[in-house]
Image (cartoon, rainbow, N blue to C red):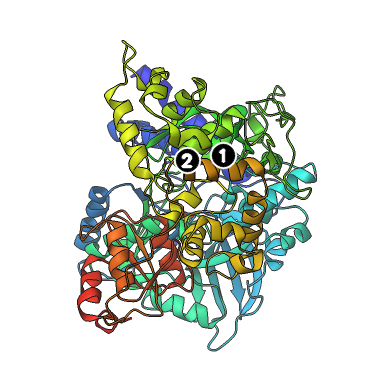
Amino acid sequence: MEKVQKRYAELVAQIDEAQQRYYVEDAPTLSDAEYDALLHELQKIEEDHPELVSADSPTQRVGAGRGSSFAAVRHAEKMLSLDNVFNEDELMAWAKRVERDAGAPVHYLCELKIDGLAINLTYEKGRLVRAATRGDGQTGEDVTANVMGIKRIPHRLTGKPIPDLVEIRGEIFFPTEGFLDLNASLVAAGERPFANPRNAASGSLRMKDATVTAKRPLRLIVHGIGARTGFDPDRQSEAYELLKEWGLPTSDRWKVVKTIDEVRKQIAYYAEHRHDLEHDIDGVVIKVDEVALQRKLGSTSRAPRWAIAYKYPPEEANTKLLGVSVNVGRTGRVTPFAQLEAVQVSGVTVTSATLHNQQEVKRKGVLIGDTVVIRRAGDVIPEILGPVVDLRDGSETEFVMPTHCPSCNTKLAPAKEADVDLRCPNTQQCPAQLVERIFYLAGRDGFDIEGLGYKGAQGLLESGIITDEGDLFSLDEEKLGKTSFYTNKNGAISSNGRKFLENLEASKQQPLWRVIVSLSIRHVGPTAAIALADQFGSMEAIENATVEQMAAAEGVGNIIAVSLKEWFTVPWHREVVRKWAEAGVRMVDDAKPAKPAGPQPLAGMTAVVTGTLTLGTRDEIQDMLVDLGAKIAGSVSKKTSFVVVGENAGSKLTKAESLGVPTLDEEALNKLLKDGPAAVGL
Ligand code: IVH
């Protein structure tokens, strides 16, 4: 028991300290996941030993107190926190209790849990007279002067009737988009950067100088009402409609539903779309919509019983920035990346994160040795948000970008004076670039050569049987026998080696666009390559085309055209093309067999095909669409007529949804092929 008591006291102290740093100093030293784990442990002890629970336990109160810079204000009605659930079972248990205790049918109001800081705005006869942070729930900090400067928070309510008094509760947030720019400008001014957008919101609001707050792009979304006279809505959702009419910024993403099943759908929807929003969210809040039932269900000292937060798994974690290394890409671009102490974030172990370029390291204000906040948003590659400045001990050092290529020691330089990226100009011989290029040309967008991966590329180059990609297609059994990667112990070609040679031979018949992609020309990806192949039909015609002619092809544009033209001026580049052609790589697209003059119901439409489909391979499905007159594009834009989405469709689906481009699943595709575009509403 003594041990439990000791641990209990330790936890209370740690949580107190964490709350002080989070709520009062805007400089948390723990990640949300670490904090939640402490709180969870404390709750578990309290469940097992209720005698230990005291009135000032962190489980019994709302947040932390106040800082000393602002005057104290008492809220007319207490500002509560929310209890959390972390899975469906806990959600169901909550709903069961609600439905039992409500004793009447319940409507659920689902809304986003915005990751910002709570604010209480007091309007008297429609005039904003006070704004206060939540503080300990009873008493907050008077931040009226600061809030007055935030755009889109009305100083006067409009419309009629306006109540004599109303407390409006909401969340102030810092839009994710402006966050990196803010840190960059803070670092440039010699000030401390923020660890994440939530801290940026809290820190920006609670500036001593309110004119600084006014310059930050803070926003508000209201999510409740406190004390009120002359205003008594029956439903919370009805209140939102009214608040909107009064000119207050309500969310347009709330939804009232009747069943917990529909609640689960909302939760699932925003789990998938949490990154398409202008602010961070850490969950969905579910509220009983009927105000009378809210009253009946009541609250604990900490949180209402009529609302619950369904928390998503955290995507942020704190870890150490051990060092910064640089990577040399296939077009010579040198990019720094962070080496991190291994940490679990949303289910995977992260040990590195990209830093894009040297300016980016500066902009983020991170030092080697810092504890940093990293975020892994969905399946996006992990990124560093910012440093935890308070944990610095003075031993941290600034990252200095190397001046010479780490692979071939050539002096690095920007391609053009104004470029931020540094490049290794030794494109033909730099070992790092060579391996990357060969690995890429063998990949899915290039020749798609099974049996040639990263290790294989290294093996071919290190053994000296090829000096650059130009030699690749003249490989034969004799030459390959000199690479340990493709041979057995006795020196004979391995079965992998043989398969590789077979695939290499077959890949010579790949369509022209894949050959173009495989040349690793800057800016020329599959979309541009498909357009070029369609337009010009042969490598020779592309080489001889003018910049204007190339730029006129749909999906090409000037930057790509100039890049291509420059590429062809380099003698060893032309030599690669010549050697490939000599070795039998197809440099001309076969003239498409004259189509039977069948109906062309999809003429004038541009389609994108993505994901895994069962009807045929992606190429086959694209051919079917082309036969009906459609054009195929490699990426989704406003001009795309429709996107065919198979299983595991990724960013193209998201893009289509955000642009409002129609999407067709396999069933709809079938219909389209059989009955034409009108049958699927196109
Ligand atoms: S309602 C009486 N709704 O989450 C109910 N809170 O963890 C009080 N929050 O202190 C809160 N989005 O600052 C509510 N849609 C939302 C919210 C929300 C974010 C914050 C709020 C609250 C904290 C609790």
From the top left corner, tell me how far across and down residue 225 is, in percent. Answer: 48, 69
| Type of the residue with mark 1 | Arg
Pick the front one: 647 or 129 = 647
Pick the front one: 41 or 449 = 449
Q: Which residue is mark 1?
A: 330
- Tell which residue pokes out farthest to the top in this image: 490
Left/right placement of residue 146 relative to residue 671 reads right
| Type of the residue with mark 2 | Tyr
Q: Quadrant of residue 486?
A: top left
Residue depicted at x 42% and y 28%? 456
Q: Tell whether circle 2 marks a residue whose Cβ is less than 8 angstroms from ligand 1.
A: no
Pick the front one: 291 or 607 = 607
Q: Is residue 208 visible?
A: yes
Q: Which secondary structure lies at badge 2?
A: helix
Q: Is residue 118 visible?
A: no
What is the number of the mark on residue 64? none
Q: Earlier in the sequence, mark 1 or mark 2?
A: 1
- Tell which residue pokes out farthest to the bottom in this image: 160
The reply to whether callout 1 and callout 2 are in contact (CB within 8 Å) is yes
Q: Which secondary structure lies at badge 1?
A: loop
Pick the front one: 383 or 107 = 383
From the top left corner, tell me how far across and down residue 47 is, in percent. Answer: 30, 35
Q: Which residue is mark 2?
A: 440
Vertical placement of 576 versus 499: above or below?
below
